[in-house]
Image: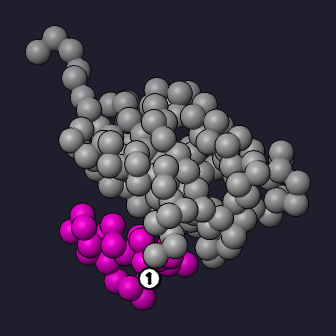
Amino acid sequence: MAGKYICVNLHLIWSTKGRRCLIDPEWSPRLYAYLGAIAQAKKARLIEANSQRDHINSYVSMPSTISIAELVNAFKANSTRFIRQSIPNRKWFAWQEGYGAFSVDRCSEKDVIEYIRNQEEHHKRKNFMEEFIEFLKQHGIDYDPRYIFD
């Protein structure tokens, strides 16, 4: 075959350190734009992003040139620096160490985008921890409840 043909789309979820309510809807659109620029610099594409005060959901298309860990680390490290430097009263902002990365097939893409867009509605029924555990179960990922959250 003469070229690389890939389609790797992921639903990424991670939380603020200690799940503290630090993400403000007033400045979160700037955060999403910044994540989009980070993705572009890594040859990825941020398709959708939305957050609640204690966590963020994003949907990305991955290139073949980097690992999931590299992209998530770039998102978290660079957005931490951005928030600390440009958002008042967030000089101590931090993300939790871990994250979730869940594969998305093209048939489910619209559902994932809709899910991310409607975070506020979903979280009227489930908090972040319940949501995250549900994703782990749906994707058949083993976990130890004693160590899942920092």
Residue farthest to the bottom? 146
Is residue 116 placed above or below 125 in the rendered structure?
above
Q: Residue 28 or 36: which is nearer the viewer?
A: 28
Q: Which residue is mark 1?
A: 147
10 Å crowding of disc 1: few (<14), some (14-19), many (20+): few
Residue 36 visible to an observer of this rendering: yes
Quarter in which the N terminus is drawn: top left
Q: Is residue 118 left or right of residue 26?
A: left
Q: Secondary structure at mark 1?
A: loop
Residue 116, horizontal then vertical, whole percent: 46, 52
Is residue 89 placed above or below 47 in the rendered structure?
below
Quarter in which the C terminus is drawn: bottom right
Residue farthest to the right? 88
Residue 73 visible to an observer of this rendering: no
| Quarter location, residue 140 | bottom left
Residue 70, horizontal then vertical, whole percent: 47, 44
Colour scheme employed for the rendering of this structure = one colour
Residue 73, horizontal then vertical, whole percent: 54, 49
> Magenta segment: does it hold 43?
no
Q: Residue 86 or 49: which is nearer the viewer?
A: 49
Which segment is the magenta one?
127-150
Residue 128, horizontal then vertical, whole percent: 50, 72
Is residue 64 placed above or below 69 in the rendered structure?
above
Is residue 66 placed above or below 88 in the rendered structure?
above
Amino acid type, label 1: Tyr
> Magenta segment: does it hold 137?
yes
Q: Is residue 80 left or right of residue 44?
A: right
Tell me what residue is drawn at x 75 percent, y 48 percent: 27
Tell me what residue is drawn at x 63 percent, y 76 percent: 18
Tell me what residue is drawn at x 53 percent, y 46 percent: 49
| Quarter location, residue 142 | bottom left
Tell me what residue is drawn at x 42 percent, y 71 percent: 131
